Image (cartoon, helix red, strand yellow):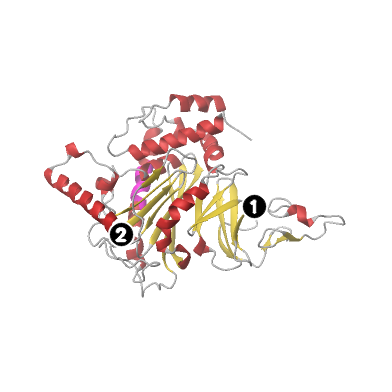
Amino acid sequence: MTNYDIAAIRELVARRRPRHALESAFYTSPEVFAADMDAIFHRHWLYVAVECEVPEAGDALAVDIGKSSVVIVRGDDEQIRAFHNVCRHRGARLLPPGPAIVGNLVCPYHAWTYGLDGTLKFAEHMGEGFDHACLGLRPVALRSMAGLLFVCLSDDPPDDIDDVIGQMEPYLAPHDLKNTRVAHTADLIEYGNWKLVLENNRECYHCMPNHPELTIPLFAYGFGFAPEELGAEELEQAERYATLRRTSHERWEAGGLPSRLIEHLEDRPTGFRTERLPLDGSGESQTMDTMAACRLPLGALRDKAAGGLHFWTQPNSWHHFMGDHVVTFSVIPLDEGRTLVRTKWLVHKNAVEGVDYDLENLTGVWNATNRQDADLVEMTQRGVSDPAYIPGPYSPHTEGLVEKFMEWYCARLKVHLG
């Protein structure tokens, strides 16, 4: 049931000034947060997991999204399905958040038992005439994108997901996600609105002064800069990057590795962006020494300097794919001022910790970067909550992708609010 003033939120959206940050209420109002959950997180495709987290029949994973919860499970037929994590009897949660191994999905309250395909198999004491067939688990729309699992809580999910999959699979396939495993997962609660988390991710204006670890392998120039403000040395570095980007794309594409930019961040329900970008130093991985963190390469990748494929989706994910490992990020709003950022590091399924990789080296850059970003988001949340806050303008050089996120967000709110 809608518990917000639709007219008031429509007015907020209508007042939104292009190429400027949002008004305070977008980040602080419980009513706007409720509208966001209805309009965005209950209606769009959300990245939640990786196929390798449910590798065998009976492997399950429960993921909470706001007040909703979803169970992802691999069936005896090897198919992966998703269901609402709600017993059809009196509504108890079937599984707690996180991974599980199950023979069936058994409600812990009254032992109603569901098969891995969601059918109700057993319900004691229900009397004659009880129809098991009508009370299977409610399915949730699910798609695999070369091993990345997306769900949509809506009964009418955006139908452009298959087109996105078609465009992205050639980019993702060389990394062979289905033959990886999760080496580490880190859950971090950021004390800011989910949109601030996404805004922060969609620009690198803040990278040089705030991310000393990340800017060792990553060129901040890849996400915009003001050339007229660069000194001679900085301009030389920017030109070096531009040349490296061009020659790398030529080499990768010639070798059958799709690399060039695809961007549809604001012009479709399932917004996305991808591009393979060169890394600094050895160009191998996002590590402190830019060398591969894992000895075993992923998939068919044999070019150690394969850079980093970045992939963003609206509204809740970003990913980095290297030749030796993958880092995935999902964003789950908790309330108007708290957001869960879940990071997973994937390595080859046969890689052994302490033999093929060192966990601290594997996770060091992004653990540090995540903590730094959390501090920046919290600082901004405090600022937008201040009565003195007035939305400021975006940089035309370095915050164009933030503006595209805002265009997408406001457009989706308008569709929902009518």
The picture places residue 36, in percent across and down from the top left corner, at: 52, 37
What residue lies at 62% left-to-right and 64% top-to-bottom? 75
Amino acid type of disc 1? Pro
Asked whether residue 217 appears in the rendered view, the answer is no
Q: Residue 254 bears which disc, if any?
A: 2
Q: Secondary structure at mark 1?
A: loop
Q: Quadrant of the C terminus?
A: top right
| Image position of 222 with respect to 348: above or below | above
Give the residues drawn in magenta, as a range: 370-378
The picture places residue 174, in percent across and down from the top left corner, at: 40, 62
Q: Quadrant of the N terminus?
A: top right
Q: Residue furthest front?
A: 254
Q: Residue 139 bears which disc, if any?
A: 1
**From mark 1 to mark 2, how far is it between C-alphas?**
43 Å
Residue 143 magenta-highlighted: no
Q: Between 136 and 261, which is closer to the camera in this rendering?
A: 261
The picture places residue 342, in percent across and down from the top left corner, at: 45, 54
Locate residue 195: give its quadrant.
Answer: top left
* Secondary structure mainly formed by the magenta segment: helix
The picture places residue 213, in percent across and down from the top left corner, at: 27, 55
| Mark 2 nearby-residue class (10 Å; few <14, some 14–19, many ≥20) | few
What residue lies at 19% left-to-right and 39% top-to-bottom? 227
Amino acid type of disc 2? Ala
Q: Secondary structure at mark 2?
A: helix
